Image: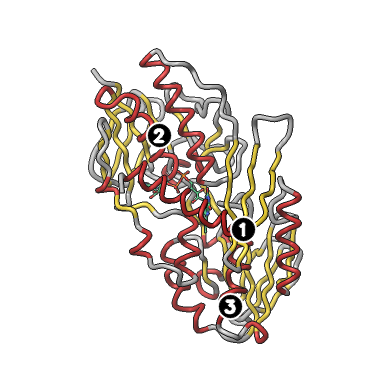
């Protein structure tokens, strides 16, 4: 009988894992890929939606396109995970697994920044980005505060990208002189593992008159006074607040007993949890890497290759190397890249590639190659 692999979550991790297993094993494996949504959206598309460069419909990649030997996608919501029995309950069925992979990503705890829901706007969900696509074009004067609730958060450079793209948007509408942009980040520098990348971003902020406040969290908003309160007690008045909510593993993962301190601890070499034949990849796990799609994808590949080696006598892959490249929108039609290595060397490193139009094309290829590989479109 084929091995039954149940993958929870069809994001970067789940899509890469199911694709790699299907490519190697075809119908010899029975993969059930579960997601509550009908479509996938790249994280970076949210910024494109927010700044009117595209529409939500144009960036949705529908799971109904997935036609891979051995893979069955089901649109269901996971309501219970029993890691000991490797049994998953959803709103529609019960799934028994020989191998269970949790790839449910990180959820947003909007309430952890009191006032955000009432007096601010988050830009980390498709719905939030869609709302902002209506609001940003009408903003023509006043103070904008971009603020992050806490670390870790997805895609460490994304709030910096938001600041730079907002600057471009205001310039294009000839209202930049009437606006102030302040950017508050819990990290001391924009991309701590890469001092060169951080220096380039800080220089770009300085050139554009964007004030950077590093090492500070936005703890709450006072919507009546239109003030953001920072963790050191400082107050920042705002007319438009663009926020990144606190992140945490989905409730169903916390309730399963798999999580510790908010996320699922794994062996960073193999992505195994403390339960036999149960793995966790991507943002839901603590694997010693940043929360970003490229790392979810790399981790998923290691899990897949280990399973393929075990079942088809292939070569075992080396340990997960924690390497990945992140593209960074620098504004003015240019994209930079930071090549991160968190696990393979003696220390964490990040090599900076200066912004260019060539990297714009490379980022486009990053998206289109995954779209083709995962969805065949
Ligand atoms: C603005 C922004 C920009 C970004 N830019 C980049 C970038 O340029 N490069 C990059 O690498 N990363 C980027 N990211 C980060 C990236 O999107 C995430 O890190 C990545 O998606 C994580 O992959 P994952 O597989 O762990 O989780 P996800 O891709 O989040 O997938 C998790 C899936 O689980 C599903 N799910 C959750 N709960 C349930 C449930 N109970 N039942 C069923 N299904 C459920 C969700 O619907 C989701 O599809 C960005 C993120 C944001 C917000």
Residue 240 position, x and y percent, is 58, 78
Q: CA distance from mark 3 to mark 2?
A: 40 Å
Evaluate if marks 1 and 3 touch, with contact meaning CB atoms under 8 Å apart.
Answer: no
Picture quadrant of residue 96: top left
Residue sitting nearer the eye, 252 or 286: 286
Comparing marks 2 and 1, which lies closer to the viewer? 1
Is 237 located above or below residue 309 in the figure?
A: below
Report helix, strand or loop for mark 1.
Answer: strand
Mark closer to the chain start, 2 or 1: 2
Distance, label 1 to label 3, CA atoms, is 30 Å
Q: Is mark 2 in CB contact (under 8 Å) with mark 1?
A: no
Crowd band around label 3 with a 10 angstrom C-alpha radius: few (<14), some (14–19), many (20+): many
Question: In which quadrant of the rendered view does residue 102 lie?
Answer: top left
Q: Residues within 10 Å of mark 1 (few under 14, many from 20)?
A: some
Instruction: Name the residue that disc number 2 marks.
Output: 17
Q: In the rendered image, which residue does mark 1 sit on?
A: 356
| Residue 318, percent from left and from top | 55, 22
List the residue tagged with mark 3. 240
- Give the position of the N terminus as an image quadrant: top left
Q: Position of residue 11 (x, y in %)?
A: 41, 45
The residue sitting at 25% across, 48% down in the picture is 64
- The yes-or-no answer for disc 3 within 8 Å of ligand 1 is no
Q: Is residue 203 above or below residue 324?
A: below
Dot 2 surroundings within 10 Å: few (below 14), some, or many (20 or more)? Answer: many
């Amino acid at each position: 009988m084929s091995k039954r692999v149940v993958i929870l979550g069809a994001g970067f991790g789940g899509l890469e894992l199911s694709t790699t297993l299907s490519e190697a094993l075809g119908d010899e494996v029975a993969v059930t890929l579960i997601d509550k949504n009908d479509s996938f959206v790249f994280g970076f598309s949210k910024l494109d939606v927010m700044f009117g460069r595209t529409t939500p419909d144009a960036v949705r990649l529908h799971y109904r396109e997935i036609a891979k030997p051995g893979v069955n996608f089901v649109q269901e919501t996971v309501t219970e995970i029993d890691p000991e029995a490797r049994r998953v309950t959803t709103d529609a069925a019960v799934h028994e697994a020989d191998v269970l992979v949790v790839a449910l990503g990180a959820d947003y705890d909007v309430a952890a920044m009191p006032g955000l829901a009432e007096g601010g706007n988050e830009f980390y969900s498709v719905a939030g980005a869609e709302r902002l696509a209506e609001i940003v074009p009408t903003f023509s004067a006043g103070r904008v505060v971009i603020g992050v609730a806490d670390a870790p958060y997805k895609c460490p450079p994304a709030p910096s990208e938001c600041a730079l793209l907002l600057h471009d948007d205001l310039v294009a509408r000839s209202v930049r002189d009437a606006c102030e942009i302040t950017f508050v980040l819990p990290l001391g520098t924009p991309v701590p593992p890469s001092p060169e990348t951080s220096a380039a971003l800080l220089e770009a902020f300085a050139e554009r008159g964007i004030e950077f406040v590093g090492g500070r969290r936005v703890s709450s908003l006072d919507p009546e006074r239109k003030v953001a309160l920072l963790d050191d007690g400082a107050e920042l008045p705002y007319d438009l607040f663009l926020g990144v909510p606190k992140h945490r593993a989905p409730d169903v993962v916390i309730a399963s007993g798999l999580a510790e301190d908010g996320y699922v601890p794994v062996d960073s070499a193999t992505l195994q949890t403390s339960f036999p034949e149960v793995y966790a990849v991507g943002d839901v796990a603590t694997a010693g890497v940043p929360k970003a799609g490229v790392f979810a994808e790399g981790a998923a590949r290691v899990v897949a290759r280990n399973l393929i080696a075990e079942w088809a006598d292939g070569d075992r892959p080396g340990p997960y190397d924690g390497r990945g490249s992140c593209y960074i929108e620098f504004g003015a039609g240019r994209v930079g890249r930071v090549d991160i290595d968190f696990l393979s060397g003696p220390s964490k490193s990040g090599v900076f590639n200066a912004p260019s139009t060539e990297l714009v094309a490379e980022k486009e290829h990053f998206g289109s190659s995954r779209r083709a590989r995962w969805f065949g479109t």
